[in-house]
Image (spheres, rainbow, N blue to C red):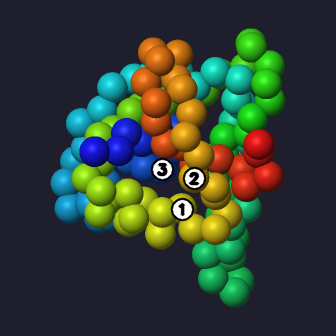
Amino acid sequence: MPLLFTYGTLQDIEIQKKLFGRKLDGEKDILKKYKLGTIKIPENQEQTQTYFIAMHTGNKSDEIEGTVYELRDFELNIADEYEGYFYKRKHVLLASNKKVIIYCKPDDK
């Protein structure tokens, strides 16, 4: 089962229930060498919404606090669809040494 590190809307219980049909159980963790930025995403033709996005800095003092959730394989596809093409899926190691998936800025290496 994939592990997903979240730092934004996927931590919201109502969004979890809407997307996955259940509340996810998670553990706090830290993503090092990243910082939170923001991105504007069009909600429709007239409105945009601002969301957090993880940006790789390489700086040891930068970190993002978040939550790790264990997803079922099909739920990862749902998360991909939810995040859309504004985010890129990437595998990283957290401070706890867990290998997880994050959604980050597309041009991050």
- x then y, percent, for residue 34: 70, 29
Mark 1 neighbour density, 10 Å: few (under 14) some (14–19) many (20 or more): some
Which quarter shows the C terminus?
A: top right
Q: How many marks?
A: 3
- x then y, percent, for residue 48: 69, 70
How far, Cα to Cα, is label 2 from label 3?
Answer: 16 Å
**Disc 1 secondary structure class:** helix
> Mark 2 and mark 1 in contact (Cβ < 8 Å)?
yes
Q: Residue at x 64, y 68 (%)?
A: 85
Q: Residue at x 74, y 14 (%)?
A: 60
**Disc 3 secondary structure class:** helix
Is 95 drawn above or below residue 10 in the view shown?
A: above
Specify the label residue 9 is tagged with.
3
Is 61 drawn above or below residue 18 in the view shown?
A: above
Mark 2 or mark 3, earlier in chain: 3
Mark 3 or mark 1, earlier in chain: 3
Give the residue type that dot 3 points to: Thr
Q: Is residue 41 visible?
A: yes
Q: Residue at x 65, y 47 (%)?
A: 104
User: Label 1: which residue?
Assistant: 83
